[in-house]
Amino acid sequence: MGKDCGNHGECERQKMYRRAFACLLGLVIIVLLIILIVWLALRPTKPKFYLQDASVYQLNLSTPDNILSSVIQVTISSRNPNDHIGIYYDRVDVYASYKYQQITLSSVLPPVYQGHNDIDVWSPYLYGAAVPVAPYLADALQQDCAAGFLLVHVKIDGRIRWKVGSWISGHYHLFVNCPAFLSTRGDGSGGAALSFKFQQMTGCSVDV
C-alpha cells in the first residue's frame, strides 16, 4: 500500500517543495561549476619581481657592542604576467635582512592597482638605526666584507587581491625574497666606512 500523506493538497505541496529544492541545488551546482571552469581557465600567475639596484649609503658595524646602522636604497620592479587578471597590492612592506636577521625597519609602499601585463617600479629607502646583531652575525659580516663580497636579501611582505572582470578575490599573502649581491672595498675594521657596488639585476622568488 502506498504512503498516505493525509490529503491530496499536502502531497502536491511536498512534491513542489522537493522540485524547487532540486532545481535550486542544481542551479547552485551549475554556478559553482562555471566559477571553477572560469577560475581554471583564468588561473592567476604569480607576479614577477626583479631587484634592479641596491645602493648602500651606510652599513657601519660598531664593535664590540655589535650595533649595526644602515641606509639602503633599493629599486624593485614588479610585472603582472596575466592577460585578463589585475592585481591589487593592498599592503607592501619592504625590508633588508642579513643571514635571516632583519637589519632595517620595514618601508611601507603606497597601495597600487596593477593592470594586465603592467609594470610598476618602487625605489624605497630602508633604514636601520643602531640594530643589535648577534656576535656570530657581526663576525660573519666582517668576514664577508673582508672577502669583498656581501649578500643581503631584500624582502617584501604584503597582501594582494586578484581582479577578474568585476569580481575581486579575498586577500592572499605575498612574500618576495630578492638576493642583493654586493662587492665591497675595505673591511670595515675600526668603524671605517665601506663602499659597495651592486653586481647585477636579479630575479626574486615569489610565494603567494
Image (cartoon, helix red, strand yellow):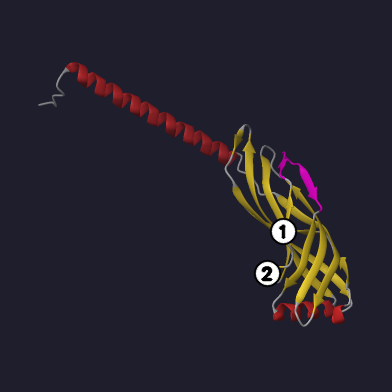
Q: Decide which of 75, 14 is in the foreground and name it.
A: 75
* Residue 184 x, y percent position in the rendering: 87, 73
Q: Which residue is mark 1?
A: 106
Note whether 108 is above or below 153 in the view shown.
above
Q: Amino acid at mark 2?
A: Tyr
Asked which secondary structure carries label 1, the reply is loop
Q: Is residue 188 visible?
A: no
Residue at image location 63% in from the left, 32% down from the top: 165
How far is disc 2 from disc 1 in space, using C-alphas? 15 Å
Q: Give how far across and how far down residue 188 sits, in percent.
A: 85, 78
The answer to whether residue 120 is visible is yes
**Disc sitting over residue 100 in the figure:** 2
Q: Which mark is residue 35?
A: none
Crowd band around label 1 with a 10 angstrom C-alpha radius: few (<14), some (14–19), many (20+): many
**Residue located 78% across and 46% down the image:** 120
Part of the protein shown in magenta: 111-123
Element under disc 2: loop
Residue depicted at 58% across the width and 40% down the height:
169
Q: Quadrant of residue 126?
A: bottom right
Q: Quadrant of the N terminus?
A: top left
Q: Is residue 113 above or below residue 148?
A: above
- Residue 54 placed where, x, y %? 83, 61
